[in-house]
Image (cartoon, rainbow, N blue to C red):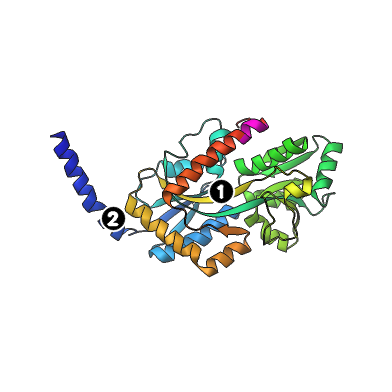
Amino acid sequence: MKLMISGCVAAMLALVQPALAQDFPSRPITLVVPYAAGGGVDATARLVGERLGEALGQPVIAQNRPGASTVIGAEAVARAEPDGYTLLLVPSTHVVNTSFVKKLPFDPIEDFTPITIFASLSMALVAGSEQPFDNLRDVVSYARAHPGQLSIGSSDSLTVLAGEMLKSMADLDIEQVNYRGGAPTAADVMGGHIPLGVLTSISTTPLYKAKSLKVLGVTGPRRTAAMPDVPTIAEAAGLPDYDIQVWYVLLGPAGLPKPVVERLHSEMEKIMEEPEMQTRLAGLGIDPILGVTPDQAEKIMKSDMRRWDKIIKAAGIQPQ
């Protein structure tokens, strides 16, 4: 009897799933952004969400749920119905949090369905225009001459990690100050309320072009096309092992039906292939990533989770 019931269920699912894919979406989709409005992730979500909504024929509405280093927004999606109408756009902070946050209310892998990793970018170390340093070596010299007197703003585990790695590798005594997003971090740096900050290249690029602050270095292994005269932190501070890049992933709750995943993945691939989208992303300092399947996205997430766990432990960074 049990085998017969299982067979019936399987047969019903086989009939239901194609119909689900055909009907999806039939109403607006909520795209949860676990950051404050106005920051880099928010800008990306709104750009991608608008285009995804056009492709799907239903609005994709960005919903900001900042706080706790992306944990609040991610938890909301982990607890949502796995029907494709609640999605999460989040950077690789999502897997760093496993080692960075003391108690996560979810498993960053098991409680989510990967759809695709679609973009990568660097972060940037920035300073207020009125600060007494023009490059990273000036910061290092100032910090060593004034231990404990400099502070650096960050908004999630990756920006905190960028600052902590600089402190550890250059042996600096700098205080970390946590913000709820890139926009408030940038505002306080520009307003002189805090001397330094770590922002994504998305948040930094327009401020760099407007000369609203000083961009002292980017965290990745190479300079970005959007800010070609800004050195990497590795070269600017003489720290060859310094390298932090960010990727962006689109996730749903665990148990998202395969046809829905395939539809969303297919549309995201088409969007990332569009020359106009690539140009707009490049203007923000973002590199599109193509061809990452849901299975490959999960493998990347697991691999990076292990990598960052080793780096965090080696740096002596304590969970927050």
**Residue 317 image offset from top left, x and y in percent:** 65, 32
In the image, residue 10 sits, relative to residue 283, either above or below, namely above
Q: Secondary structure at mark 1?
A: loop
In the image, residue 96 sits, relative to residue 116, either above or below, namely above
Q: How many numbered marks, from 0 up?
A: 2
Which image quadrant for residue 213? bottom right
Q: Is residue 188 left or right of residue 34?
A: right
Q: Quadrant of the N terminus?
A: top left
Residue at image x 45%, y 44%? 298
Q: Secondary structure at mark 2?
A: helix
Which amino acid does the dot numbered 2 rest on? Leu
**Residue 245 image offset from top left, x and y in percent:** 62, 48
Q: Nearer the viewer, residue 135 or 47?
A: 135
Q: Earlier in the sequence, mark 1 or mark 2?
A: 2
Q: Which residue is mark 2?
A: 20
Residue at image x 62%, y 61%? 284
User: Residues in magenta?
Assistant: 311-315
**Residue count near mark 2 (Cα–Cα under 10 Å), binned few <14, some 14–19, many ≥20:** some
Q: Quadrant of the C terminus?
A: top right
Q: Which residue is mark 1?
A: 35
Q: Is residue 69 left or right of residue 195?
A: left
**Residue 170 in view in this figure:** yes
Which amino acid does the dot numbered 1 rest on? Tyr
**Residue count near mark 1 (Cα–Cα under 10 Å), binned few <14, some 14–19, many ≥20:** many
Residue 131, magenta (yes or no): no
Q: Residue furthest right?
A: 145
Q: Nearer the viewer, residue 260 or 182?
A: 260
